[in-house]
Amino acid sequence: MGAELLGPDQAEQDDVVLAWEGRDVIAVRLPQLSESLDHILAAMERRHGMPLADLDRKTKQSVVRTLEARGAFSMRHGVETVAGALGVSRFTVYNYINRENSAKGE
């Protein structure tokens, strides 16, 4: 799968931290887009424990930030695919992206 294993203290927001008997033991960093966007969206649904379309607006914005950081919107039809998974329009996804870029001063 191409994932990188790290110490739990090196984990970043998008990394998966695995625990054993209540103690964090290892972090897994997934590759940027070596899997298809559909697999990444499915993993995000598993992480949130529900369909992405059922998330609240703030959480959907966080999902879009994460996907943008992973390069999802550089893929052909990336915005359309994400919009469908989130149950929003393409326009809404672009608004989420633009809002984040405006907050960063870009």
Image (tube, rainbow, N blue to C red):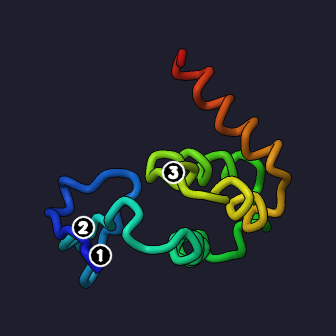
Badges 2 and 1: C-beta atoms under 8 Å apart? yes
When asked about the image quadrant of residue 50, the answer is bottom right
Q: Residue furthest left?
A: 7
- Left or right: residue 88 versus residue 104 is right
- According to the image, label 1 marks what residue? 18
Report the Cα–Cα distance between label 1 and label 3. 20 Å
Q: Position of residue 52 (x, y in %)?
A: 70, 67
- Closer to the observer: label 2 or label 3? 3
In this rendering, the answer to whether 32 lies above or below 37 is above
- According to the image, label 2 marks what residue? 27
Q: Residue at x 29, y 80 (%)?
A: 1
- According to the image, label 3 marks what residue? 66
Describe the element under mark 1 as helix, strand or loop: strand
Report the Cα–Cα distance between label 2 and label 3. 17 Å
Q: Amino acid at mark 1?
A: Leu
Q: Amino acid at mark 3?
A: Thr
Nearest to N terminus: mark 1 or mark 3? 1
Nearest to N terminus: mark 2 or mark 1? 1
